[in-house]
Image: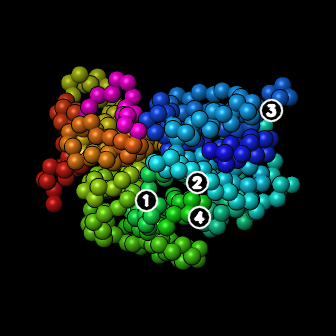
Amino acid sequence: MNKVRQLLEESLTGELYQMTLSGATGEATGCSKKKIRPVLLKDRLLFQITAYRGTQVFHENHTAEEAAAILAADLSGSFKQLQIETTSFEATVLVSKKGKVTVRKKQRSVSEDNVKVSLSHNRKKRYILEEGRPVPFLVDLGVQTKEGKVITSRYDKFRQINRFLEFIEDIWPLLPKDRPVHIIDFGCGKSYLTFAMYYYLHELKGLTLEVTGLDLKKDVIVHCNELAKKYHYEGLSFLHGDIADYTGTDSADMVVTLHACDTATDYALYKAMKWHAGVILSVPCCQHEVNKQIACEPLEGALKYGLIKERLSALFTDALRADLLEENGYDTQVLEFIDMEHTPKNILLRAVRRVDAGMANGQSGLTEAEQKSGQCCKEPGYKKPDSKRLAETLQIHTTLQKLLEGELV
């Protein structure tokens, strides 16, 4: 770990942008990731370590020496990856399951004179795709100018793209590194997030990818294929077609379905489960099916209001989907995708297939990280899902249930 300590000493200065610890193991005591940045408090340079535990965030400020000791200890058992970005270089530390440490470092192409690090305690959020650094697909899709400035009217889209990449950042250590990663994006639309995902995983992380985007709009598919060719994004292609009818593969490492309307999300989740996809990221949209069925006497006082019935139906739809994913071999999280101020449809389902996912009915399967550590990272109070009971209580029978029960061909 001498190389790691030396790298930490070089990085923990006022030139640091940010460090990110990810790939948590069972020894991380419930902490999913940590972020480190420099702060200036009373003219003293310190480093703020932000720990993410479930829905809670904890901040601590440390000297460079203290922070280096904490990070070195974390890499000795609690986390498998450290990403470092400074004004002059970028670096990655990877720790294998056998404890082998790999350090990769490269100089930044941006001049130090053109980069300023904010040391404000409450500084402006820094995104994975930085404002001021032009990204070709963001320019062509009308999110950035050629100089890298985010167009004011598209700032919400810029934030959404970066929020999505934060979810990708959390799961990328689980993706295969010894072969091409096969990803299907159902209902890709204009493919802002598809291009962002490809750019992050291939251009920034160096993975070889085979990404297929599928959508019903022919003109959009043509345009996306033209852009992929323009950027020389080999392995990225777009097809015209319906999710329910797609038979282009029988396996996938990751399935993404963002804003697929109503039951199209169910078909996408079903195919992902059938293929035993390692990771599923889903942002559901327009959940009408349950709204037409839901009937629950204890909730009559709420369901008589149309708007509330619509919101509750959408929430119950996603709760049932999450339970069904759990019961079919996936550890599933229901996360906030973007702020409620932008849209009430802001839920993202993130599901990671358990290593022993052949165990049915939500039995105690483990994720890859949990298996390696010999521990289970389920939060205290976790209860096994019971989708059947939930559906019976609400008197609903959804498309995803029917698909899993073999009622739909």
SS at mark 4 in the image: helix
**Which residue is the site of mark 2?**
102
Which mark is nearer the camera, 4 or 3? 3
Q: Which one is in front in this view, the residue at disc 4 or the one at disc 2? A: 2
Q: In what element is the residue under mark 2?
A: strand
> Which circle's residue, 1 or 4, is located before the other in the chain?
1
Q: Say if the magenta span includes residue 378.
A: yes
| Along the line of sight, the residue nearer the viewer: 230 or 378 | 378
Q: Position of residue 334 (x, y in %)?
A: 40, 38
Q: Which residue type carries mark 3?
A: Leu
Q: CA distance from mark 3 to mark 1?
A: 39 Å
**In whole angstroms, how far apart are the C-alphas of marks 1 and 2?**
17 Å
| Displayed quadrant of residue 362 | top left
Point 86% across, 55% down: residue: 113
User: Mark 3 or mark 1: which comes first in sequence?
Assistant: 3
Residue 203, disc = 4
**Figure check: 253 above or below 295:** below
- What amino acid type should be assigned to the residue bearing mark 2? Thr
91 left or right, relative to 229: right
- Position of residue 98 measured from the top left corner of the image (x, y, whole percent): 46, 48
Closer to the N terminus: mark 2 or mark 3? 3
Identify the residue position indicated by label 1 in the image.
176
Q: Which residues are magenta?
A: 373-385
Q: Which residue is mark 3?
A: 45
Mark 1 to mark 4: distance in Å? 16 Å
Sequence-first tag of 4 and 2: 2
Instruction: Say whether marks 4 and 2 touch (CB < 8 Å).
Output: no
